[in-house]
Structure formats: C-alpha cells, structure tokens
Amino acid sequence: MRLIGNNKKILVDMADLTTTDFYLIRTPQFSLSKLSDLNRHIQNGDIHSTKEMFKDDRFISSIYFSSRYFYSIALQWINNDEIGFDSMDRILISLYKYYCRICSRSTPYGLFAGYSVGEIVEDNSDFEFAKPRTTPFVRPDMLFIKRVKDKILKDNEDRDILYFPNNTLYRIGESLRYVNWDDQYNYEISEIEMNDLLDRILSSAKKGSTLSEISKLIEEQMPQADGTEIRDFIRSLLENNLIIDRLPPYLTSIEEPINEMNTYFEKVGIFDENLKNIAQVINLGNSEIDINKIESLAADYKIPEDDNTQLFQVDLKINFSKNKINKKILKTLIDRTSELSKLTGNYSDNRLLSFCESFTQRFGEREIPLSTALDPMLGIGYGLQTSGNVEDTPLVNDILFSYKHTNKKGVVVPPIIQLIIEKYIDHFSPHHFKPICISEKDLDQVTNVQEELIFHDDYCLFGELVSDSIEDLDNGNFKFVSKSPLPTAGMSNQLSRFAYYDQTLRNHMDRLIIKEGEDYIYAEIIHSPNDRTRNVLLRPNFYNYEIPYVSNSQTDLAQINVNDIMVTVRDNHIILRSELLNKEIRPRLSSSYNYGSSQLSVIRFLGDLQYHNKYKGFSWDWSVLDHRSYLPRIEYKEIILSEARWKLSQNVVSSRQELRGLLGTLAIPQYCIYKDYDNTLLLDIGNEVCLNIILSLIKKRDIFLFECFHHSSFIQNKKEKFTSEVIFPLVPTLRKSSAKDNIIDKMLDGKSIINDFFPGDEWTYFKFYCSHSTGDKVIREVIIPFIKQTKQKETQWFYLRYEDPEHHIRFRVKEHLTKKLIHSIKLLIAPLIETGYVFSYSIDTYQREVERYGSKNILLSERLFYYDSDAIAEYIELTKDGDEGTRWKAGIISIDMLMDNFEVDLKDRIDIFEKLYNIFLPEYVDLSQNGARKAFKISIEKELRMHKNFLDDSIRLKKYGTFDDFIVPFKNRTKRINSLTSLIRGNTSGNEEFIKLLQSYIHMSLNRLFFTKTRMHELVMYYFMYNTYKSIFYRNETKQRV
C-alpha cells in the first residue's frame, strides 16, 4: 500500500483481472410477452382469459413448490366459474405477483426461473433455446429430510447409529462451554461442569459411539445406576446437544441426500420403505413432476396442506442449444470496472478493525484459541465496540479523521457526490428524466490518490445486459445494469449452488479455485442457520479442508475442529493457524448465506475475515442525497451504476384516483420495479391490480419504485422476449500470496522461555486504574518515588498505558511480591485513591510477549523497556507544567535518537515509518471513501507544512533549541542502551525482522509518552517522520549528483 500523502496517483490496471471461458445466465421460465398478455386481459377486465393463463401447468407447479397451502386455494379460485373480475381480489393479486415472478424476475427460485452455463467466445454472440427448454431438478426439502431422519432415529434407538461430540465444545478449566440450540435454532453458549464420566463419554465419542456403547460406559463408571437413570442421562446428552449424529445431508456433498441417508441406514440394519418411496418421487420428478404422488407422500407423514411444509425442493436449468457471448463485451466491462476502481479502495471491516484493536490491548501478540478469543465472557467477543475520549491534543485536533471513535461532527460527503451536487443538480427533476452520465474527466476530478489494490482469489461481474438485439450487443450498443459491486469478490458465492447439479459448471470452478499454498490452506466454513436455509446452501466443496460449526461434515480426514484454530494479530493482520497442521488457515464460505446476520460470532468472524483488507469493488452510494424523493439514473459509459428512483411516502394517497395523480406528477413511467431488499416486482401502473398493490404497500411504509429496462431484451424465442441476468467470473492474472513470511514458525519460536510470571514470581505486575489525564500523576507520584526507593539495586522495571477496557497504567517491576513491596506501593497510592484520582489497583500475571520480540531478544527488550521507561518518566517529571504541544515534539526527537542508537540507515527509516503509517491509517481514515481520504490528506499536509522547520531542525540538523533541557533524559538513555543495540540486531534473522522489532519499540515508546489518543498521535508522527526522512534522502541524492 502507498501513502495517502504521496502525490503520485496509483491506478491498478484491471487487466490484472481477466475473464474465464464461461459464464452463467439466469432467466425466468416465462417470457415478458406473456406478462404483457396478462396485463392486457386484466386491463380489459377479462377474468376468463386471465384464468386461462393461470391454468398453465408449469405456472401451477411453480406455485405448488413455493406454497402448498396457496396452491390448493389458487386451484379452487381458478376453477370456480362463479368468481368474476375484481382488481382488489386478494387471491387475484397474489396470483398476479406469482405470474409476474415467473415472467420478469431472473433470480432462480423453484420453477419460476433457472440458470444455464454459457461460453465466452471470440466469434459472435448467439442464443437459442433447446427442446425441452427447461430441466427440473427435484430433491427433498431439507426440513422434510430432518423430519424423516428424526422419525427413523426415534423408531430405531437401539441401532448402531454413531454419535459424536458437539463440534463447538471447548474446555475452560474444569468446565465445558459450547453452542447449544433449540428446535427453532436459537443459539446460546452453554456451560457445564466437567467430570470423569462426561470426559470418558466425550473422549470415546470422538471416533463415534453408539448409544449402547455409551450406556455400557456409564454402567462401568456408575455400577449403582439403574436402566432408567442411564437412559435419562443419555437423553440429557442428546437434548442438550452435547452429542450429535453425523447423518446426511451434508452441505458439501453432491450425492442425492435421500440416497445417501438410505445407504447409511442400511449399513446399520435399518430398512425404511418411506425412503425408497421418496427416492422414487425424486427420480420421476426429474422427468415429470407428479404433484399427486407428492401429496400422497405428505399424507403418509401426516403433513396437512395448511401446514405448508414443503416436501421437495426444485431447481430449474434453462436449456440452450446456443449460449455464447463475445469476449469483446466482457473486455469492455473489465475496462470500465478498472476505471471505476479510482473511486474506492481495499475493504476494511469495522468489526475486524475493532477486533484487532481489542485483541492487541488484551492479548498483545500472543496466540490464543479462537473459541476463547470470541467468547464474550472469556475473551473479547466479536462485533463489540470500544469508546474513545476527548482531551487536549493540539497535534491531532485539526486533522480530519474519518474514524475518531468519538461522536460525529458531520457527515463526510464523497467527492463524487459533491461533484454531482455542483455539476448535475438540474438532473434531479423527475420531469426531465435525464440520466447523469459521469465522464472520465469527472472521475479524474474527484480522484486524488488510489491505494494499491489487494485482490481476493476470484471475482465476478453480476448484472443485467440491456440491448435491443444480439447484433447491437456485439456492436457495443448495450448497457450493463450493475447489481452488485464492480467487481464482486468471490465468484463461488454466486455459482456454487448451481454447481451442485451441474457437472460442467463444477469442472469450470474446480479448475479456477485455488486449493492451498505452500504455508497456508483454505478451509470451507460448514454451517447452516436452519434446515430450510440448507436448500440453497448445498454445494460441492472445492477445498481440501472444512471447518464444520454447528453442522455436519462428511469426513473426519479433512476437518479442522474449531478447537484446533489459534488466532493472533500482527500489524493489524489477523492470522489463524491450525495447531495440528501447523499452517495458516484462510477461511472461505462458498455460498450465498448472509453470514453477517448469524447469531454465532465464530461464523460472522470467519465470514468477515475472508475479505478483510481485500478489494471488494465499487458500489454506488447516494450518501447525503439518499433521502430525496427522486434520484436520477447514474451512468458511466456502458455501466448503469444506479437506476432512477422515486420515493412514495406512507399514506400520501388513499385511493387509486389519487395514486394515478401522484404517479403522473412524479412522471413515473408505465413500467417500473418495486424493490424490497432482494425482492422485486415488475409493475404496470396502467393496471388496476398493480395500483392496488402499491396502495396496500404505502399504507404500511414508505416505498421505492425504480426504472425498468426489461423492454430492451436481446434473448428471444420467436417473438417472445426474455429478461436475464449474467454472472461473469473473473480471476487475477497474477495471484499473489499474502503469507506472512514464515510467521507460523516465528510464532512457535521461544517455547523454552518463561512466558508467564504469576504473583510471587520474579516479576511483579501492578495495574493502576485511573483517567487518561491522571496517568501522568500516577507516574510522578507513585512509580517514580517507588523506583527511587530501589534505585541503588538497579531494579528493572517498565510501564505502559492501556485500555482494558478502562484506562490504566501497567507497571512491571523485577522483584518478588513481598509484604514490603506491597506496603511501599500502598503508601504511595493511598492519597490518590482517597482523592479519587485512582479508582482501584490490582496485581496481575505478567505475560511476556515472546512471540512479538523473539526468544533471543525478550530479555534484552525488557532491559530496553526499562531504560526507555526511566527516560520518559524523567521527561514527564521535568515537564509537569508543560503543554501538550511540546510532548509530541519531544516524541519526535526521542524516536529519531532511537534510530540513531540502532544505526538505522535512511532507506530503512523511510520503510519503517511508511509501514507504521499504513498500519495505523485504516483505524482513523475510511480508505474506501475518496472524500475521507482527500480531506485527511489536505489537513495532515497542512500540519506538516506548519511544523516543517521544527522537523528539519531536530531530525536533519540535530538542533533542538528550547528542547535541549527537556531531552536530557533521552540523551542519558542513549548512553545506557548502546550496549544493547548491536546485541539485539545480531539476534534477528535478517533486516525485515529487525525492522519489525524496531516498529514495536517505537510504538511502545510513544505509548509511554502520550496520556491520550496515543495511536492517533502516532499516525500523524509517523507521517511526519516518513516525509522528513524521505526529504533528507532526496536532498542527499541531489547533493551527490551535483
């Protein structure tokens, strides 16, 4: 990543992303022409013709697989000749919505719409439907499978079904914690006390145990227990989900679930005729769907129609004899995507940024079990936020940070929106209906600097191609309505569901997806929030490993149990490691599951992590203009970034007549689309049924209508036009590894060094809880006097400032905990407690950060911390009446001296402070927003110019002026650490490790110096020092050339 302050523009060429040789097209089963026919019949009040259209077997079957309950109601309504036309008839309205769905919405769902795999070719685009035009794929509904399975298990408790421990179990001391759930899949973390019997049962069940084996084990351990007590105990294990079966269906198996289940049961001697009956319906359904046979099966399981339980899930493949798109079209879209990348940057999830900060504060660079880290009681949880504070901080007060962790003073308007306000405001009248066409010049005007984009493994472009004909499409006369970010990270999220059925698509994806690297592995997250959702989560597994969590996986060989996953944070990078494999884990979730809504922190965390610090593409955001009642279309060349939108406020009208008047006033076109999150409905506002739909909606809430492009459809069958959506997979041409340079080996370094010092050991560790501004008072009136008492012994000590979550001073002294030591501290701290300056204090365990500083350097580092703490404490004592405007300047001088002490050359200094700046930058600046980046750059450059003379004098010329007296402690530190610097450098394996070590020393030194907003100060100081060292370097280069 390059610095925001660098004047050079960086634009990653999207030639780094390339097309593949295939794509996916999605289209409804019926044409738009059929919907036009229906609209005409409704406008004419022709109930007979309307019902005739509804009688189409394909349409009726589509309704059945959507709602068995409404299917029976619809049939009665359709076949009742006494029912006349009534545009307010609720059944007619529901049938109209369904018919609209099967004609106009491309999202695959049941028999309403389907998919097909096409080719990317050098020659002309071409489309032609095959016969038969559709192929249905029928399989049991996952909730129905659950009912079938539960019934079989209940009837066969004595059979050899294997049970395993809940895969979320983890041990804390003498207790077990795990994720438990009820029948509705409401999750909670449960805790039970471990005992020898439970330990034996769970250990035995790791390889699978039958209930009879568990019963025998209990008999051996508890001979006095009778049969009833044993059965009750086992039932308790099952009801509390401590042990679970691993029966099919499996989320990443491509086998038919019923056949897989039947095979399993037959192996243990269970032969169920109902399973065979279900399999027969499936085999028949894939060629000819027989609703009567399905209903007969429902009767066998006593499932009434009004229960609305679906017995089968059906998906649809659209058959084409010709299905290919010219490569030039995709090349154009990639070029436009490249040009738009100027407007955004790499994605940093706020939840993960908060996690990094909280983890570092709590655990430093230690590696701990993931389950512990994410446990809200034992660790830091996930999604939790920390609050900041406001104090006198002159250096950072005038710099415009996006993220201050304080209350917002105002909304940062993205530059592209500001440009639209200034240049295109006349487009915001619905009567003109003029799209805003952003130009390349506009992009250049609002783009200042672009960070280097870090690519995900793969991407896709997802949207609607709008063109009047195939010839126009190939000639470049088309628009692309973007329906997700450009490009969208993770092609498998969009495609894997269809690869479950489609061998051709499966082969394409398997060829493109990276399986693992030299030092890391990819692992598929296996989780489903409930049984019904499983219907759209079945998919192949394209990776060699799986992480099952509250879900089953079909094999033990490639499973990574959550207890095997360790986590640490290094330089704001989150690293997962498998203890068993000793490799970095990169999680992947190759499904469309919205993991962000999961109740489980592990799933949200792993889902977020797969995209962290990666480029996620550009999405249009109206920002401060989003509230407007009319928003025009936004175009960039061939790309439609945002459709025109009209807002209808709740209860603004109460009748069809008033509604017609409002729609005319707003100049809403006859055909428009109603959107409610992912649900869309094509409306014809000349149709009374559609008007009644709108009226019913605005009685409940504000609604939004969007312009429609269905009139321009290039896919035709004779005279019928079909709407469609396309998904174009993209992959980086050069896939770079972001492995952290053998970091796994480094984390394992130094296991022989003592890590933890408990009270009474060689080191004693105090925490003094106080406000930020009182921290200096604790240093002056407690720590310094205490150290003076032990000065003659040259006792090692050091301190840090921390939030955990309350602010406190961490004071570590290399002395055993004795009554005398406690008494000394108590005498010094008592006055501050009495006056309320210190809230409390405690003694804790000192956990060395061996992973961070290395086993060879941890002892030398502690001595360096001692000398540094001594110097900064002396500085704080000298400047107790000074202002904060001098403190950061002293920090600049102190760190520059430290660089001199370690004899760091100019190039390495530039590298050190550039890296530090980029590590801290995402905490305070929203890099995805150009406006935020630009505002920050302008303000920090202004501060840099203001202090340029001081920086040049103190760093280049070593002229300290009025600071001479204040920096005496740092000069004394230089004398003391000279004996350490060469030893520390000699103990590192190379320059890169040495630089990382120096970065930690710099950060910790400044932590000791500032009493508030330390990291914010650091960000600005790192920017100052980077620019100053770079200026000195170029000055020296110029002198050498002259």
Image (cartoon, rainbow, N blue to C red):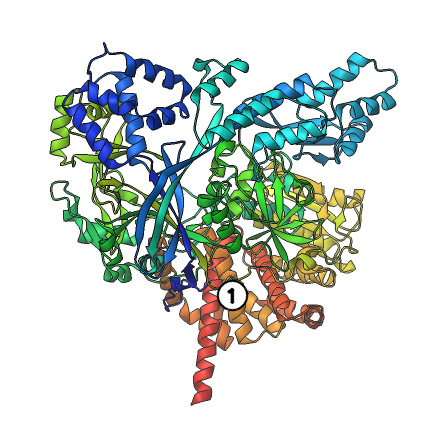
How many neighbours does mark 1 have within 10 angstroms: few (below 14), some (14-19), or many (20 or more)? many
Q: Could you say where residue 138 lies in the image, as x and y percent from the top left? A: 48, 31
Circle count? 1
Q: Could you say where residue 30 lies in the image, as x and y percent from the top left? A: 30, 34
Q: Is residue 675 visible?
A: no
Q: In the figure, 126 relative to 654: above or below?
A: below
Disc 1 designates what residue? 913
Q: Which of the two residues, 472 or 941, is positioned nearer the viewer here? A: 472
- Which residue is most to the bottom? 1042
- Which residue is most to the top? 82
- Under circle 1, the secondary element is helix
- Answer left or right for 99 relative to 244: left
Q: In the figure, 977 relative to 764: above or below?
A: below
Q: In the figure, 691 relative to 300: above or below?
A: below
The three-letter code of the residue at mark 1 reads Phe
Q: Which of the two residues, 688 or 776, is positioned nearer the viewer here? A: 688
Q: Could you say where residue 345 lies in the image, as x and y percent from the top left? A: 40, 56
**Quarter location, residue 374:** top right
Q: Could you say where residue 420 lies in the image, as x and y percent from the top left? A: 22, 51
- Which residue is most to the front? 131
- Answer left or right for 488 relative to 871: left
Q: Is residue 119 visible?
A: yes
Image point (62%, 18%), residue name: 151
Image point (65%, 35%), residue name: 168
Which quarter of the rendering shows the C terminus?
bottom left
- Answer left or right for 949 relative to 551: left
Image point (44%, 88%), residue name: 1041
